[in-house]
Image (cartoon, rainbow, N blue to C red):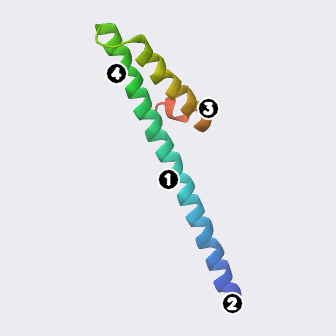
Amino acid sequence: MAGFLDRAKEQAQRGLAQGKEKMEEVQAQRTGNDLLRRLGAAYYAEQRGTGSPQEVQQALAAVQEHVAQNGDGFLKSS
């Protein structure tokens, strides 16, 4: 009986770890998408004359930092 409970506990812990990993992956993807939206908005504002090149560079730097930390998976369309 103890062996069964040990296996069940181990399997449950694996499931929790996989769920946490997936949640972190989804969160990183959402953050990346938000950063891309900000970059697009900054570029659009710059092109319309209401934004600055510095805002575009800051947004681009944030995207590049996110890619360095989390990879570029969020850039691929699904």
The answer to whether mark 1 and mark 4 are in CB contact below 8 A is no
Tag 4 residue: 41
Tag 3 residue: 68
Residue 31 % position (x, y): 45, 38
Q: Secondary structure at mark 1?
A: helix
Give the residue displayed 43% in from the left and 27% down from the top.
Answer: 36
The image quarter containing residue 13 is bottom right
Q: Looking at the figure, which quarter contains the N terminus?
A: bottom right
Residue found farthest to the right: 3
Decide which of 65, 27 is in the foreground and name it: 65
Question: In the rendered structure, which amino acid carries the disc numbered 3?
Answer: Ala
Give the residue displayed 53% in from the left and 59% down from the top.
Answer: 19
The answer to whether mark 2 and mark 4 are in CB contact below 8 A is no
Q: Nearer the viewer, mark 1 or mark 4?
A: 4
The answer to whether mark 2 and mark 3 are in CB contact below 8 A is no
Q: Which class describes the residues within 10 Å of circle 1: few (<14), some (14-19), or many (20+)?
A: few
Decide which of 68, 57 is in the foreground and name it: 57
Measure the alpha-carbon separation of dots 2 and 3.
Answer: 45 Å
The image quarter containing residue 52 is top left
Question: In the rendered structure, which amino acid carries the disc numbered 4?
Answer: Ala
Measure the alpha-carbon separation of dots 2 and 1.
Answer: 31 Å
Decide which of 72, 53 is in the foreground and name it: 53
Looking at the image, residue 7 sits to the left or right of residue 52; the answer is: right
Give residue 23's mark. 1
Give residue 2's mark. 2
